[in-house]
Image: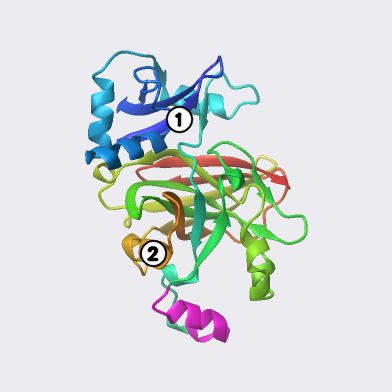
């Protein structure tokens, strides 16, 4: 199933599920305790039921409003939206996979600096902390760029991990500053700043996305109404999603809800204030974020 979170015209937030193509049904109207995907995960974990079965039980328990998905998406892009799709969950932590997750030609590996090549070839994949929920933008919110370095957009498959297990997938923009290209000691400010990631427009459970590592991702950058950059890539990684999760969780005791950006699709050239970045992932949807200087 595909899960969205929608703010309606009076400001009420609904956790909603796509019950028919293009139709979102409010779960919150049927049970006021279901306000985000986080709530469904908790019930699933305690009850032992799959998340989608928990949702089916909620759907059978009452009635509530439906929302037109396309109308909600288009409304979300306006300055005064009647409906707005917001990020579907509130993670405790955000992590990002690095250069070790995507295959690189041998000739490019041979040209890597020693510290980069070591990270690429090691058993342990590079995974970097991206901050907490206050750093995360929704699917149609602004993302940030640093004023003190060049910043790029990276379209990525996102793993939703609850208590060490992958429970859903999403997509988003893992925005990265250029400090890390100068010295590894500046890695943290390259990765953690206001609006350094976006997530959405929904989360999709594994039954509805059976092969997340064989999907097409597209990144487009628009500047002053013209396309300024683009890239297309596959979500096929050198490492499985489960292996990436292992290295984030196995030797630590992370909080319950973690999202992990898995490495991705990068267009040439830095972002500029006012750019519009659209990242689409087959089977999930797209995020569309305006760029602002933090």
Residue 278 image-quadrant placement: top right
Spot occupied by residue 280 in the image (x, y as percentages of width and height): 46, 45
Q: Residue at x 56, y 36 (%)?
A: 140
Which residues are the magenta region? 109-124
Disc marking residue 244:
2
Instruction: Look at the magenta stretch and give its main secondary structure.
Output: helix
Q: Residue at x 41, y 72 (%)?
A: 103
Is residue 133 visible to the viewer in this orientation of the structure?
yes
In this picture, residue 280 sits left or right of residue 268: left
Residue 223 image-quadrant placement: top right
Viewer-closest of 127 and 214: 127
In magenta segment, residue 192: no
Please tell me whether residue 144 is drawn above or below residue 113 in the rendered image.
above
- Which mark is first along the chain, 2 or 1? 1
Tag 2 secondary structure: helix
Alpha-carbon distance for marks 1 and 2?
A: 27 Å
| Residue topped by disc 1 | 5
Is residue 108 visible to the viewer in this orientation of the structure?
no
Tag 1 secondary structure: strand
Viewer-closest of 112 and 107: 112
Viewer-closest of 137 and 287: 137
Spot occupied by residue 165 in the image (x, y as percentages of width and height): 32, 53
């Amino acid at each position: 199933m595909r899960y969205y979170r929608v703010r309606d015209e009076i400001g009420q937030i609904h956790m909603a599920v796509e019950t028919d193509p293009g139709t979102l049904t409010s779960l919150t109207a049927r049970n006021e305790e279901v306000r985000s995907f986080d709530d469904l995960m908790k019930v699933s974990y305690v009850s032992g039921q799959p998340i989608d079965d928990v949702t089916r039980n909620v759907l059978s328990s009452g009635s509530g409003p439906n929302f037109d998905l396309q109308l909600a998406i288009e409304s979300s892009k306006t300055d005064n939206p009647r409906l707005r799709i917001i990020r579907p969950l509130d993670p405790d932590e955000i992590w990002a996979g690095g250069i070790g997750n995507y295959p690189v030609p041998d000739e490019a590996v041979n040209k890597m600096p020693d510290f980069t090549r070591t990270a690429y070839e090691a058993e342990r994949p590079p995974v970097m902390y991206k901050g907490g929920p206050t750093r995360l933008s929704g699917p149609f919110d602004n993302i940030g760029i640093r004023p003190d370095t060049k910043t790029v957009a990276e379209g990525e498959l996102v793993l939703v991990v609850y208590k060490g297990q992958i429970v859903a997938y999403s997509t988003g923009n893992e925005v990265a500053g250029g400090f890390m290209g100068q010295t590894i000691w500046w890695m943290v400010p390259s990765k953690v700043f206001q609006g350094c990631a976006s997530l959405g427009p929904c989360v999709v459970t594994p039954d509805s996305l059976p092969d997340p590592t064989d999907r097409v991702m597209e990144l487009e950058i628009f500047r002053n109404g013209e396309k300024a950059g683009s890239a297309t890539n596959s979500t096929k990684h050198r490492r499985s999603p489960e292996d990436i999760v292992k290295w984030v969780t196995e030797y630590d005791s992370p909080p319950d809800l973690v999202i992990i950006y898995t490495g991705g699709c990068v267009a040439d050239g830095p972002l500029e204030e006012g750019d519009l970045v659209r990242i689409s992932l087959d089977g999930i949807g797209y995020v569309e974020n305006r760029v602002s200087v933090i």
